[in-house]
Structure formats: C-alpha cells, structure tokens
Image (spheres, rainbow, N blue to C red):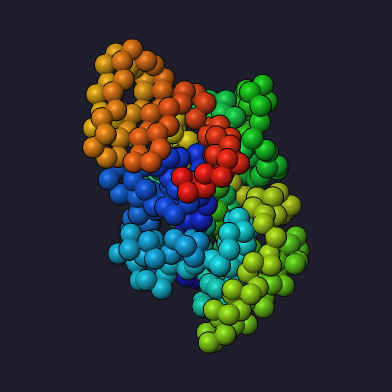
Amino acid sequence: MSTYYAVVMAGGGGTRFWPLSRQARPKQLLPILGETSMLHQTVERLLPLFPAERVYVITGRAHADDARDDLEMLPPENVIDEPAGRDTAPCVGLAAAFLEWRDPGATFCALPADHFIGDRDKFLAALRAAFEEAQSGALVTFGVKPRHAATGYGYLECEGKRVRRFCEKPDAATARKFVESGRHFWNSGIFVWRAAAILEEFRRHLPGHHAILSTIAEAFGTSRLPETLALEFPKMPRISIDYGVMEKAADVVMIETDFDWDDVGSWRAAAARRPTPTEGLTECVDSPDCLVLSTDDHLVATLGVEGLVVVHTPDATLVARKDRSEELKRLVERLKARGLEKLL
C-alpha cells in the first residue's frame, strides 16, 4: 500500500483581498477567517490524518520564510519555495516529481491553502475515500453539490462518479441550468492521485512540462538541486492543472463532498464565513450587511449604509459594494497602471 502525503498549494497574490492582502503578504498568510492564517488553518486541518513530516507546502520564494514562521508544526524543510509563480500545473508537477523520487508509489492530495471547510471530520473521511479510489490509478477530485447558481466557481459535469467535463465559470443563465440538471457540481480544486499517475498525465498532455520536471528530478538529492530548480522551473509555461491536465485526462473520478466548503475568493465570501462583521476600532450604526475592518488606531465609523465592505490599513482604505467585491482585481490593475505598486 502506498504512503499518503498532503501538498498544500500556497502561491498567488490574493489581489481580491486588497488592501489587507499585499504582494509581500498575500491572503493565505493573513487571518482572513479567524485568529490564524488561512494557510495555518489548512495545515492544521490535515494533521489528524497525516504526520507532520508528510505534509508539504509549496509557496513563492518571497513568502517561504513567512510560511515557515507561520507553520511551527511542520519541519522547516517541508515548505518548498518555487523560484517563480507558474500556476497550479507546475506546482503539482514539482510535488509529484519530488514525492515519486522520495517515496516511489506515493499517493498525495493537492489542495489550495485558502479554502473554508466547515467540518474537519467529514473532510478527512472524504480524503480517506479519495485515497482509496486513487489506488486504481484514477485522478480523483472533490465535487461540491451547488447551494445556488454561483458564477464564481467552475463546475464538474458528472455521470455517476465519472467526470465527463470540466466547465468554465458560467454566466448566470448557464449556472441556473447547471444547478437544475443535477449532474453538475462545483469544482473544489482539491485532488488526490498517485504521483506516478499524475506524472504520466503530464507526459501525455504537457510533454514540455514533463521534460523539465524530469530534468529537475535528476537533481533531487544532489547539491545541484537549487541551481537546477532556479534554472529549469521558470521555463515551464504558466497553466493551471485543470486546463493543462484534468480537462484532457480520461480517468477522472469525483467524490461528492458532504462537508461545508467555500472557495474564499472575495471579501463578500469572507464576510459570510467570518465570526463577526467588524474588527478593530470600528463603530457601525444602522449599517446592515456590512464588513468593516480597521487594522490600526484609526476609527472607521459607518452610519445608515448597507452592503458595503470597508477595509482600512495605514496606507490605503477600500470602500466597495459587497456585491462587487469580486471585481477588486480591476481596481488593483488601475492602481498598478498609475504606478502605485508600492501600495500593492
């Protein structure tokens, strides 16, 4: 029986949580949903099932030291830094190549660092089922039964437990059809597979990536690894694991989840999952459905407003309609175009 591992993908900048999230400290390192960071909560959730030495975190080089400081429960060497951000396919490929070298026959789950999962026991039970399913060589993903016609998630179209199609984030009308069909599930972005099986899919569908990963793998266990990784990893084109592999793979199986899940991708989503709608020095009067945060001794007060997100930091303040908070990337791009990178 193969050994089970967990790989937490902790890259990305989290621009949709500006101004709290910055390039130097992205959202996965911030206490968006409680007193500890989302990354810390994700790793802590895994530890009843995995020994700490079998949990790995892959993050950007600029954030690796902060991640190690945040994850005192893991061996420092289990935080692996990417020399360049290349989206989730290169991240998964690096993890698979490393684990297959470290422990031939290994099986691992790959999951994002910034999700809300409400019931840890049900989550771990689903992981156990997925690891068993993956022993056949199938690529296993988790599908979430839609609670509403969301346009911010991708969908899986299934026939029984077989995934027939990965669907892009739909418009509102298409999302309603997906929900009504009973065959579509939210794509959680959580996967389980044998390292050898996902590497074989890279060979079939991303041969250029596979060749680079093979070169990197030859340096594992040698003094050449840092130089080889720095030289070869950035050569891999940026692509997600969904686009690069999963949409093309033939043997994809879905485990339907029964735990509460959310891809916390915006202030609106975070507001629905936070224990309180205010934090810091705030005073809100007749201000329903608002999220109001202040990170210093600056008072933020609201009166007679509704459905707003107000986030104050020492050098920037955001005021936005909650129902448009998923568009925050547009604002960040405008600030970048004005040469205000120091505020990002």
Q: Residue furthest front?
A: 339
Report the residue at 49% width, 65% height from top. 61
* Quadrant in which residue 295 is drawn: top left
Question: Measuring 75% from the left and 60% from the top, which residue is drawn there?
Answer: 205
- Total numbered circles: 0
**Residue 124 to residue 282: above or below:** below
Relative horizontal placement of residue 304, taking residue 192 as reference (left or right): left
In the rendered view, tell whether residue 282 sits above or below residue 217. Answer: above
Name the spot of residue 24 as percent of width and height, x first.
Answer: 44, 54
| Residue at x 26%, y 34% (from the top left corner) | 298
In percent of width and height, residue 308 lies at 41, 23
- Left/right of residue 114 with respect to residue 227 in the rendered view: left
Q: Residue furthest bottom?
A: 223
Where residue 320 appears, as percent x and y from the top left, is: 46, 26
Q: Nearer the viewer, residue 301 or 172?
A: 301
Can residue 185 be seen in this snapshot?
no
**Residue 343 drawn at (x, y percent):** 46, 45
Residue under the image location 26 percent in, 16 percent down = 285
Residue 233 visible, this orientation: yes
The relative height of residue 285 versus residue 232 in the rendered view (above or below) is above
